[in-house]
Image: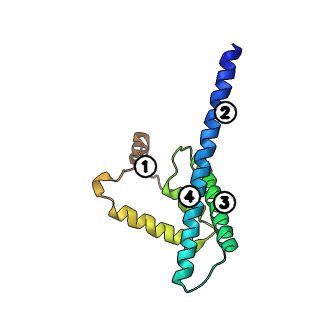
Amino acid sequence: MEKATDMEMEREEVDEEETESVSDVLRDRFRLSTISIAEAEAKRNGMEISEPIVACISDLAFKYAEQLAKDLELFAQHASRKIVKMEDVILSAHRNEHLATSLRSLCDDLKAKEPQSERKRKKTPRKENKATTSVVHIPDN
């Protein structure tokens, strides 16, 4: 029985190490991308940017992305979903009205480009249909 437990612990350690190495690779790629973007923007605007500043921007962007991912996961969980939807992304921008407006516009553009036949239609439960059709208004006397 101890061997099985030891093997399980070793498997968990290997899984954790693999997850950490994948996270490290993603973090490094993200940082390289943000550094590249910062340098390109500086060059495009005729500016110079020091390496410590670029590294700081990169770290801030990565930390922001991590927090955003956690927030989006919590929003989806709060809505009893396992999948993050566009509405979660828009909700995450509620403190930045300009960003929220841009995201709503992007969402509308994406919906407009989506073929009509592929759009999902919300189905109303039959109970609601019956309830709304059987309501009778009785005027007050």
Q: Residue at x 41, y 66 (%)?
A: 108
Q: Which residue is mark 4?
A: 29
Amino acid type assigned to the residue bearing label 4 in the image: Arg
The number of numbered discs placed on residues in the rendered structure image is 4
Inter-mark Cα distance, 2 to 1: 65 Å
State yes or no: discs 2 and 1 in contact (Cβ < 8 Å): no
Residue 89 horizontal/vertical position (percent): 54, 59
Which residue was labeled with disc 3? 63
Q: From the top left corner, tell me how far across and down residue 51 is, in percent.
A: 66, 73
- Classify mark 1: helix, strand or loop: loop
- The quarter in which the N terminus is drawn is top right
116 above or below 48? above
Distance, label 4 to label 1, CA atoms, is 63 Å
Residue 37 in sight here:
yes
Q: CA distance from mark 2 to mark 4?
A: 24 Å
Q: Residue at x 56, y 58 (%)?
A: 29
The residue carrying pointer 4 sits among few (fewer than 14), some (14 to 19) or many (20 or more) residues within 10 Å by Cα, namely few
Q: Which residue is mark 2?
A: 13
Horizontally, is 6 left or right of 79 in the view? right
Q: Between disc 4 and disc 1, whose residue precedes?
A: 4
Q: Nearer the viewer, residue 48 or 134?
A: 48
Q: Is residue 80 left or right of residue 124?
A: right
Closer-to-camera residue (97/35): 35
What percent of the width, then of the height, locates residue 113? 33, 63
Helix, strand or loop for disc 4 = helix
Residue projecting furthest to the top: 1
Are the residues at dot 2 and dot 3 in contact (C-beta closer than 8 Å)? no
Q: 10 Å neighbourhood of mark 3: few (<14), some, or many (≥20)? A: few
Mark 2 surroundings within 10 Å by alpha-carbon count, few (fewer than 14), some (14 through 19), many (20 or more): few
Q: Which mark is residue 136?
A: 1
Which amino acid lies under the numbered mark 2 shown in the image of this protein? Glu
